[in-house]
């Protein structure tokens, strides 16, 4: 593929094919297409390794620093795992979700398995996000009352994402999606200054005028959410819920590892990555996407059958947590698409 002709759909639901996408040709073609695309590009890669490689190639070939290349990372856990994802991954995911709905141009790269995940509704991210500006009025008690339900943990010294500390008129805060933590200095109730600081030395670095706060988790944990979870759990699973460490943990406000695989119990309805995409988004994926979806679906079903009989961790069925093939195809059909091929664009298999 050459720079002379990189076709891109110019309207919703239009489909084009790119051929000869071996090696770094795909990354080159995507980088060249950003300028002419009517909206952002969502690139669906086969796996995590391919995602990382594509991001590096797109950034290398990009000619404009204004064309943002976003990652929506996988949790890097196996389906139904008893471990929760690293806070750094959750931070990056929430930041990308926050940016996506306002994205007018750029690229988002995501693995197949991740694009199939059911996600928190956009209203959760919007409703639990907050912008703080220097000069704003801030009540410490009320602010703390917003941080804790959003998943932030009060600590003596802030070292990691999702932590905050209050010392008199100083608030240290490490927001999800931020590279550095912030130190907020209040003068009475007014935000007098906001500075970044180093977690190792705890010394302040640079002044900033504003910070954006995102939720600390991909699920709510306020009183209403816990009540909703308990009700949904009893409706979904038979037997005594007190036998389940999942039920007991959430009831106590201390959800155990792997709680992400119970996400639908926290909401009346979940969403998917497609619900965050602007209407003008173009989807880019390999012609073997259907096979990759089927392979992942089969592996999830196998994991489910292996683990479904644990009374302490009863499992939600795969279709509650991931899009099925028919639903995936339906969502793909709502956007302009680019199908990539290793051979000529005219080849048919």
Image (cartoon, grey):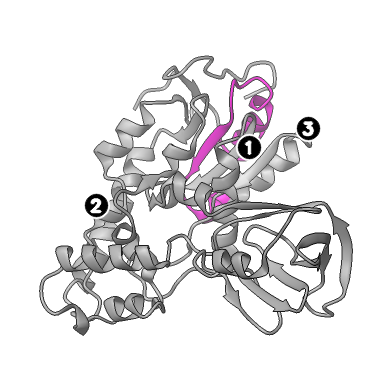
- The answer to whether residue 159 is seen in the rendering is no
Left or right of residue 300, residue 223 in this image:
right
Closer-to-camera residue (303/104): 104
Pick out the residue farthest to the front: 188
Q: Sort mark 2 into few (<14), some (14-19) or many (20+) by Cα contacts within 10 Å.
A: some
Q: Is residue 221 above or below residue 135?
A: below
Q: Quadrant of residue 327?
A: top left
Marks 3 and 2: CB-CB under 8 Å? Answer: no
Q: Is residue 274 magenta?
A: no
Q: Quadrant of residue 249?
A: bottom left
Local secondary structure at mark 1:
helix
Q: Is residue 169 above or below residue 105?
A: below
| Residue annotated with mark 2 | 319
Residue 339: percent from the left, percent from the top?
45, 28
Q: Is residue 35 magenta?
A: yes
| Residue annotated with mark 3 | 64
Q: Sort mark 1 into few (<14), some (14-19) or many (20+) by Cα contacts within 10 Å.
A: many
Q: Is residue 278 above or below residue 261?
A: above
Label annotation for residue 27 = 1
Marks 2 and 1: CB-CB under 8 Å? Answer: no
């Amino acid at each position: 593929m050459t720079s002379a002709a990189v076709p891109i759909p110019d309207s919703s639901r239009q489909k084009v094919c790119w051929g000869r996408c071996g090696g770094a040709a795909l990354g080159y073609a995507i980088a060249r297409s950003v300028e002419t695309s009517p909206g952002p590009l969502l690139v669906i890669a086969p796996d995590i390794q391919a995602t990382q490689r594509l991001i590096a190639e797109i950034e290398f070939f990009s000619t404009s620093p204004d064309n943002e290349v976003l990652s929506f990372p996988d949790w890097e856990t196996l389906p139904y795992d008893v471990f929760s994802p690293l806070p750094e991954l959750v931070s990056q995911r929430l930041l990308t979700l926050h940016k996506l709905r306002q994205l007018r141009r750029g690229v988002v790269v995501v693995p197949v398995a991740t694009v199939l995940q059911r996600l928190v509704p956009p209203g959760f991210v919007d409703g639990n996000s907050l912008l703080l500006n220097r000069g704003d009025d801030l009540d410490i008690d009320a602010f703390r009352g917003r941080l804790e339900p959003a998943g932030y943990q009060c600590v003596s010294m802030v070292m990691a994402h999702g932590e905050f500390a209050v010392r008199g008129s100083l608030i240290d805060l490490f927001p999800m999606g931020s590279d550095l933590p912030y130190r907020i200095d209040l003068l009475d109730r007014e935000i007098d200054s906001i500075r970044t600081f180093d977690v190792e030395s705890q010394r302040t670095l640079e002044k900033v005028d504003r910070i954006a706060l995102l939720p600390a988790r991909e699920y709510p944990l306020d009183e209403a959410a816990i009540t909703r979870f308990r009700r949904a759990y009893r409706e979904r699973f038979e037997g005594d819920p007190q036998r389940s460490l999942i039920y007991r943990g959430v009831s106590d406000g201390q959800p155990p590892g792997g709680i992400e695989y119970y996400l639908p119990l926290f909401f009346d309805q979940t969403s998917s990555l497609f619900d965050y995409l602007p209407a003008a988004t173009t989807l880019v994926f390999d012609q073997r996407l259907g096979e990759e979806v089927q392979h992942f679906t089969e592996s999830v079903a196998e994991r489910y059958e292996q683990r479904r009989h644990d009374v302490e961790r009863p499992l939600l069925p795969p279709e509650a947590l991931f899009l099925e093939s028919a639903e995936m195809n339906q969502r793909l059909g709502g956007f302009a698409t680019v199908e990539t091929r290793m051979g000529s664009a005219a080849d048919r298999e």
